[in-house]
Amino acid sequence: MSEVQSTSATEEYEERWANLQEKGSEYYTPEKYQLGIVLDFLDSQDVTYITEGQVYCYPIDILAEHRGKTMAVELKSGDIARGIEQARRNADFVDHSFLSIWEADVTDTLLDEVSDLPIGLIGVDTDVQIYSSPSTKAERLCDSEYIIDVINDDVRSKSPVQ
């Protein structure tokens, strides 16, 4: 009888991820893959969040709250300059705004650029690394209670999977 090798799901995922990375950046990796890794990180930090949140008419990839502080995360796999613009806009609504990109795209130049802005930078690979923290703006276009209500209303309206 032949011997069956067992590998954990984590080992298989890491092997597939390494193979994908070896193929280079010729392939576009959708933000939905980044989303899952970031959400796992937020879950581990006991953060309450919604995906595809909306503040007024502006879509936000992740809108979150933790201990009364609000945050937004803008996910980007491609147009990082556009992501910076969106994260800056999000900073007008929340306490902390982040741009989340693939770790391979984090450069010293980008870190310098972001350091002058009211946004933080997250690098994503098989896990999440916070490269820089955002500054808190003195004035926002809406108060934290409004954002927390948006999150809680969305979270409470979701019926459990049966």
Image (tube, grey):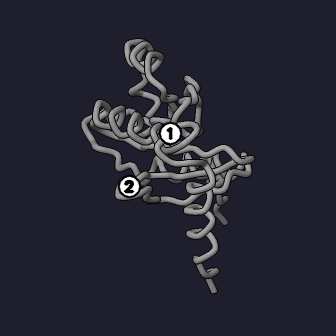
| Crowd around label 1: few <14 · some 14–19 · many ≥20 (10 Å) | some
Q: Quadrant of residue 80?
A: top left
Q: Earlier in the sequence, mark 2 or mark 1?
A: 2
Farthest residue in the bottom direction? 162
Q: Position of residue 66 (x, y in %)?
A: 70, 48
Residue type, label 1: Arg
Residue 153's spot in the image, x, y percent?
A: 59, 70
Q: Nearer the viewer, mark 2 or mark 1?
A: 1
**Residue 126 in the image: above or below residue 63:** above
Q: Residue at x 51, y 48 (%)?
A: 142
Based on the displayed image, in which of its 4 quarters is residue 77 positioned?
Answer: top left
Name above or below for residue 56 compared with residue 13: below
Secondary element at tag 2: strand
Q: Quadrant of the N terminus?
A: bottom right
The answer to which image quadrant residue 99 occupies is top left
Callout 1: SS: loop
Q: Are marks 2 and 1 in contact (CB under 8 Å)?
A: no
Decide if residue 40 is on the left or right side of residue 142.
right
Residue 36 x, y percent position in the rendering? 53, 53
User: Which residue occupies 27% across, 36% down?
Assistant: 79
Name the quadrant of the C terminus. Answer: bottom right
Q: Nearer the viewer, residue 11 or 40?
A: 40
CA distance separating discs 2 and 1: 17 Å
Given the image, on which type of amino acid does mark 2 rest? Answer: Pro
Badge 1 is on which residue?
140
> Residue 59 shows which numbered tag?
2
Left or right side of 38 for 46? right
